[in-house]
Structure formats: C-alpha cells, structure tokens
Amino acid sequence: GAGVSQSPRYKVAKRGQDVALRCDPISGHVSLFWYQQALGQGPEFLTYFQNEAQLDKSGLPSDRFFAERPEGSVSTLKIQRTQQEDSAVYLCASSLVQGSTNSALHFGNGTRLTVT
Amino acid sequence: DAKTTQPPSMDCAEGRAANLPCNHSTISGNEYVYWYRQIHSQGPQYIIHGLKNNETNEMASLIITEDRKSSTLILPHATLRDTAVYYCIVYMIKAAGNKLTFGGGTRVLVKP
C-alpha cells in the first residue's frame, strides 16, 4: 500500500519498560510528524522532522520521549521507562512538501500503547 | 494559529446533507481552513481546505463566509461510513513545520 504504515498496531508494556514505535512514511515525503492521542481527545503534536532533521520537538512531554529519523525516511519514537500516563494512541503523519497548500498530512492508523 | 469552535456532536440522516459549522473569528488573512476527519480506530484523514473561496472535491464542499470568521463543511449525501469525528483546523502555511493543532472536533453520527 501507498499509505503511512505504523507498527506495531498494539503494544502492551509493563510500567518501566522501554518501547519503540515505528513509522514508515509515504515514499518521498519530506516531512514527518508524531502525534499522541489520549482516549476521547484530539491528537496532540509531539515532534516534527524535515528529512532527517528534527526541527521541532516542543510537544515531547518529557525527556523519556525520543524520536529519530536517521536516513530521512523511517522514523522511530522511543519511550523509556514507560508510565501509565503514556497510554495513548501514537499517530505518525507525513507530507510531501512544506510551504505550499499541497502539504496536507497523511496519517497512519497509529500504535495503541497500553502501559500496565 | 487561530482557534476554532465546533459543536461537540451532531446527528445526520443517511442520504441527507450534513452541514458541519466551524467558527474561527480570530483567523488572520494568510491562514487557511483545513478539515480532517477521524473514523474510529483510524488516523485522521484529510478532507478539504480553502483560503477564502468556496471549494469542492469528491468528498465534500467547503463554504467560507466573506469575512472568513466561519465556515461550513458540507457532506452532500451522508452515508453510514461518514460517521466520524470531524476537525476544523486553521493555520498558516509556513516554509516548514506546518503542525496541525487539533481541537475537540465534532462527533458526527449518521443514522439509517
């Protein structure tokens, strides 16, 4: 498929464990975003990459959250020492270009993280 | 980016037009209105966007008032598959970092 792919679809972690969530953006898309969505809420911005450069990480809730996109394609969101409040759906989105009206975001279906 | 106000929920009859309002009274001249929707257990999906002219595509129509302080998303013939949360988002297109700020959206239930 040509859409944004995220894996795993579901992840259950014990409190204190580290997790890694993967995002495969649409091929050729320059920009990549991570969002966090709590139950019943709208998605909230976490971080943004343009190619391999992380240009905005203002939404990361703590230093336990780390994202990377080393080759400007696949991205990984890592959460260290997970806490129960980290339970949420983590959404990845990509867009072809920035700075134009052709910059609509294409979202994956997310990874649902449950911390027990 | 300008804040938007949407009703929290609305029902619509299948086959009828669904008109979803959005207020964005603090919108500035170079900010666009974007609409996304999120079907249960899926990521948000882009629907349509506009600056000041009305827009139409295969999914919906977007009507923006002349003063641009409000807009309406129209789903011309709602189907059960249009049941979703609809988000109205206003933001300025920049050279980089066009991050979307989602509000609470409108939960639309299409009924048979």
Image (cartoon, rainbow, N blue to C red):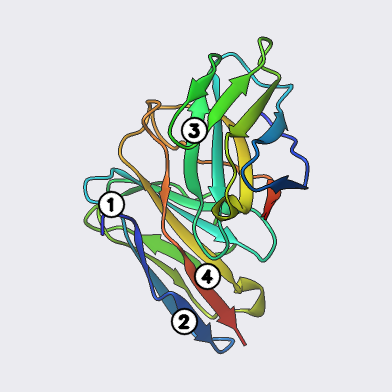
Q: Are marks 4 and 3 in contact (CB under 8 Å)?
A: no
**Amino acid on which the number 1 mark rests in the picture:** Ile
Left or right: B55, with A83 as reference point: left
Q: From the viewer's side, name the closer residue of B32 and B41.
A: B41
Q: What residue do we see at 40% from left, 61% from top?
A: A67
Q: Chain of mark 3?
A: B
Q: Where does label 2 land, which residue? A: A18
Answer yes or no: are tags 3 and 2 on the same subunit: no
Q: What residue do we see at 78% from left, 41% from top?
A: B7
**Amino acid on which the number 2 mark rests in the picture:** Asp
Q: Where does label 1 land, which residue? A: A26
- Residue A109: percent from the left, percent from the top? 45, 62
CA–CA distance in space, label 2 to label 4: 9 Å
Answer yes or no: are tags 2 and 4 on the same subunit: yes
Left or right: B34, with A32 as reference point: right
**Amino acid on which the number 3 mark rests in the picture:** Ile
From the image, state whether disc 4 or disc 3 is nearer to you. 3
**Secondary structure of residue under mark 2:** loop
Q: From the viewer's side, name the closer residue of A57 and B25.
A: B25
Q: Where does label 4 land, which residue? A: A64
Answer yes or no: are tags 1 and 2 on the same subunit: yes
Q: Chain of mark 1?
A: A
Q: From the viewer's side, name the closer residue of A1 and A16.
A: A1
| Residue B48 - label | 3
- Residue A93: percent from the left, percent from the top? 41, 52
Q: Looking at the image, is mark 4 or mark 1 earlier in the sequence? A: 1
Residue lying farthest top?
Answer: B66
**Secondary structure of residue under mark 4:** loop
CA–CA distance in space, label 4 to label 3: 36 Å
Q: Are marks 4 and 1 in contact (CB under 8 Å)?
A: no
